[in-house]
Structure formats: structure tokens, C-alpha cells
Image: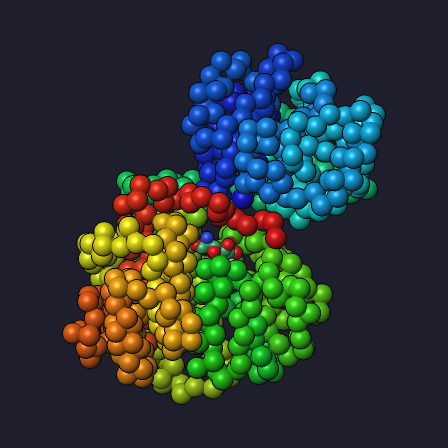
Amino acid sequence: MCGIVGYIGENDANSILINGLRKLEYRGYDSCGLATISNGELQISKTLNRIESLTAAIQNNGVSHIGIGHTRWATHGGVCERNAHPHTDSYKKFIVVHNGIIENYLSLKKMLKEKGYTFYSDTDTEVVPNLIDLYYNGNLLETVKKVTSIIEGSFAFGILCKDRPNELIATKRNSPLIVGIGNNENFIASDFSAILKYTNKICILENDDIAILNEKEVKVYDKNLDPKQVTIKEIDADDSDSEKNGYDHFMLKEINENTITVKKTIDYYVIDGKINFDLNLTDNDIKNIKQIKIIACGTAMHAGLNGKNIIEKLTRIPVSVEVASEFRYSDPILTENDLAIFISQSGETADTIACLELVKKKGIKHVSIVNVKDSTIDRLSENVLYTKAGTEIAVASTKAYIAQVMLIDLFAIYLADKLESYNKEELSKILNYAIELPNKMQEVLEMDSMFCDYAKSISNCRDVFFLGRGLDYYIALEGSLKLKEISYIHSEGTQFGELKHGPIALMEEGTPAIVMATQEKLLDKTISNIKEIKARGARVLAVTTLKEFPVDIVDEVIHLPKVCELFSPLEAIIPLQLIAYHVTVNKGLDVDKPRNLAKSVTVE
Ligand code: M6R
């Protein structure tokens, strides 16, 4: 989704903003732009192309010491240059970049038009610089407070005034924004990757805080304009995480980090054969849990489905997996003995945050599984377990999914241990199987040439089916999402048994069907289902861990090393991630930045 970076300081804003925008590219965008002030002149450049073309556009810009940049993911108004940010007021005095949505912009626009303001874009954002101009009384801090008290919705703003080139303003409500503190230079950013090259000292703005930055200092005010202490945090992250390190694409690099991700997660949480979670949940709280709700979106929700399988098997506590955008409006039935689990890579997904707030309001105990430390979900949650995936740049989530699955698996074992709901010896065997996983996963990564060959055979297809039963269905769902989101091939992840109740109508001669078969007790049923689709002409690839799988009933087979069945998603997803990757490369598409998608979905 949209990204913001802003700079004020002794160095040249142009190159720092371009670098920051490059680091924000991974969030997904359809246009970008930046504004600087140089010798009293306002310079604005925008493009519908990639950040590189902005670099060319600003080549003749003079040196500037202040500026704001933006990557836009269109919500209000189509993808065109005049809708790209930054936006100014009619008189080109105030300049604004915005993440979020201003819900009452239509009435504000009408009011501003009646007062003689002219609008040049279709965006909700453009009302903001015009409102600032309307209410400007010589004190920008007071004016920004006035404007943010009128607007409804979510926002993070970077604001410049052409006549005040020594001041950069930032404010936010329900959309993340941080201030970065450097030496003789300060920054604003919607996520710290944009400024990590320059500083790891950040101050996280809270809702309705207003920050005023100059080259030397940062002041933060609360919504009553009372000064606040600037609390500085040091971010423990490495800028090299956002480099490709020799791989052609971030997605390929990140898939190859699946193994180390699982290893890091286990090493972090399993000490001397025991799972250590620092949670504010007493043994009694755990014993009282009557039902668990796992709430998430997209791939994180698929990791949640895997969680349902293992938690129910090991603890017999009923688990439901809820899509956050539905759950928040469903008037959910929650009782005091429920446990809610939130899963989010970014920790900034708007729908998941809204559900977390709802659950907190009802006083329900909760645990969040988050990859980005200091993200909104991290800060709002009473209990957090961190996935050890490191920064994930490619829009398609791969290693973060693996980390989520591994962590929720450990959480299930942890619950079962506390509840004594599963044979102790068996449980410690299961934990030992987890420890062996990275080696098995590495073997799968090394089979890549097979996945690459298979990808060639489906690159020009219109539809691909991903099929499975039970846990295999959850793997199929995630495989299908990977393929469609980056290759734009239509795909369906379907419960194999459900196929004949409708979707089988789409099976034609040669339709590719990828069948997951990792669950021994479901093998016979899976075989019957394969026969049904073969009879309709499907070209079947089986991905299996089962030695007894009858290879002659399918067209192709990928045999994976045998792992404990509970953990099969961790290795069986790897071929599907790599197939999606190779298909997309074959089609010449942008693997890391698929169209219409954003890494961090900060609007509902
Ligand atoms: O940051 P989150 O884990 O909350 O994001 C949830 C989804 O938006 C995300 O998993 C999305 O489905 C990915 N593009 C899938 O690859």
C-alpha cells in the first residue's frame, strides 16, 4: 500500500527520498512522486512508472534540504499522474503526502469548492492541503490540529509549507508513521525500512500526535497540543535484509530462506527440549480455554488454517479460523474463556487491527503472531510471539508464511503440554520431528529444477486447480493464492471431495491439477478423487510425501521426503511457491511487485 518518506537536514533531500521510495517499493504501488523546496522554489515530480523514472525526472532539481515522497496504491481516483502524490492546495503553498482514506472528503470538497478552491485530482487527499490553506493562521501546528479534527477516516500525513522550508510536519491516525532521528537530519516514514540506511533511531507516533521536525530537533505534541516526550527506540534490523544478495528476485531469495527461518524459530523458542513462550497466560487461563478463534487475512489466514488442524488434533479445543474483514462486521460471539490468535506478517493489516481492537474491547485474551516488531499489532497486543522470518520484501508471502506455520505448530505443542491433552512421549517426539524439519526442507529446495520444468508446462495455461483433503486442502489454498497473485493465472484451491459438487464442471482435457497427498489416512479417498478428474481429462501432478502413492494413476509426481504429517505444510508448500515463481518468470512478469497488490494492506 501507499508509502511515505520525508527528509529535512544537511544532506540533499533528492537522493535520500529516492532511496527511501525504493525501499518502500515492496509495499506495492501504482504511481509515485516527490516534492522538494529549493531556493524558495517548490519542485514536484510524479510518475506512473517505477521509482527509476523519478530519478531521471528530478535530475535538474537543485540541491534541497527538505522534501516528502510517496508511493501510491490507488483507492480514490484512478491510476494517473494527477492523482499521484504529493498534492498541493490551489495556491501551491501547502504540500501533502497521505496514506489512508479520508471518509468525509466529499462534503469537505464541496465546502472548499464553494469557497473558491479548485481541485485538480480525484483523490480524497487533495482536500487536506486546501483545508490547511483555509484555516492557516500563521501557526502550522494549530492549523494541522484544526484540520485533523475535521477529517474522518485514517491517515498518515507528511506536510510541507513552501514558505517554511525549515519545518517538516507529520501526523497520523490509524495508519503507521514514524520519525527517524539522525545527526543534523531527521526523517519521517511509514515504515522504517525507508530510512534504515540513515538511522536506526526512531520515534513511533501515536494517533493524533503531531511532530514538527527541523534539521536539529524533533518536537512531538499530543492532540491537545501539549508537548510530549520524544521516546526513541533503536530498531534491531539490518538494511541488508532488503538486498537481493545475488538472487534474481526477492521472492526467490525469500523462498530459499525458508529453511533458516524454521531453524531460527525453533532455536529461539525451543530451549533444552522445552518450548519457552513469554506469555501473560497462566496455566489456569490455558486450562479454561473453551474455544480458539484465529483471525487473519490472506496467507496469514492460511497459516491459521494449519493452526486449526494441529491445535484441534493435539488439544481437542475447537478452533475456528476467521477472515478478518468478515469477522469485524459479523457481530461475533465471544465469551470470556475464548482465546483469540491474530496472525500478521506486517502487523499493519487494517482489518486484522480492527478485529484486535474489537477483541480487546470485549476483554478477550489474545496472542498475536507478528513478524514486524514495533508494528501496530505488536504494540496493541497483550501477548506477542515473533516470527523469525526477517524482513520480507516480495509481495507474495513465502518465508513469513513458513514462520507463521512453524510458530503456530509450536504454540499447539505448548498448549497440549500445558493441558496434558496429548501423550507426553508422543509430544516430545513431535517436537523432535520439528527440529529435523530444516534438513528435509533443504532437500526440497534442492529439487528446484523439477519445479522449474513443471512450471514451463503450465505457464501458458488459463486455469490451474490445487486440490487436497484435510491439511492438504489448506496447503492447496496457499499454493493457489501464490500462483494467482503473481502469475495472474486463474487458480482454485478446492477441497478434493467438494470438487464434484460444482467446480469439476471446469475440468477439461489437459486442465492442470496439482494434487497434494501428504495425509496417509486420506490417501484412498484422494486416489478416488484423482480418478474422477483423470476421467475428465485433467493433467495431474501429485505432490506427495507418501511412499505408497500409486504413481501410475497420475501424469507426474513430485516425491518429497517423509516428515511428521502435522508438519507437511512446511515442506509441501515449497514446490508450490517455486512453481508459482518460475511460471511468473516465464511469463516475464514482475515477480516481486505484482499488479494491484500491496505488501502491507493498511486500508480495509
Ligand atoms: O501482513 P499480513 O500478514 O497481515 O498480510 C495479510 C495478507 O495481506 C497477505 O498475507 C497477502 O495475502 C499476501 N500477499 C499473500 O502472499
Q: Is residue 288 above or below residue 390?
A: below
* Colour logic: rainbow
User: Image quadrant of residue 118?
Assistant: top right
Front residue (pair 458, 480):
458
Residue at 20% over, 79% down: 548
Can the viewer see residue 229?
A: no
User: Image quadrant of residue 538?
Assistant: bottom left
Horizontal arrangement in the rendering, residue 82 relative to residue 581 (left or right): right
Q: Is residue 558 above or below residue 261?
A: below
Q: How many marks?
A: 0
Front residue (pair 37, 550):
550
Give the percent coordinates (x, y) of residue 88. 67, 26
Residue at 66% over, 71% down: 332
Residue at 39% over, 56% down: 490
Give the percent coordinates (x, y) of residue 439. 25, 64
Give the percent coordinates (x, y) of residue 391. 43, 48
Horizontal arrangement in the rendering, residue 354 relative to residue 512 (left or right): right
Give the percent coordinates (x, y) of residue 279. 56, 68
Q: Is residue 115 above or below residue 581?
A: above
Residue at 23% over, 51% down: 456
User: Image quadrant of residue 156?
Assistant: top right
Front residue (pair 117, 214):
117
Task: Name the quadrant of the N terminus.
Answer: top right
Can the viewer see residue 23?
A: yes
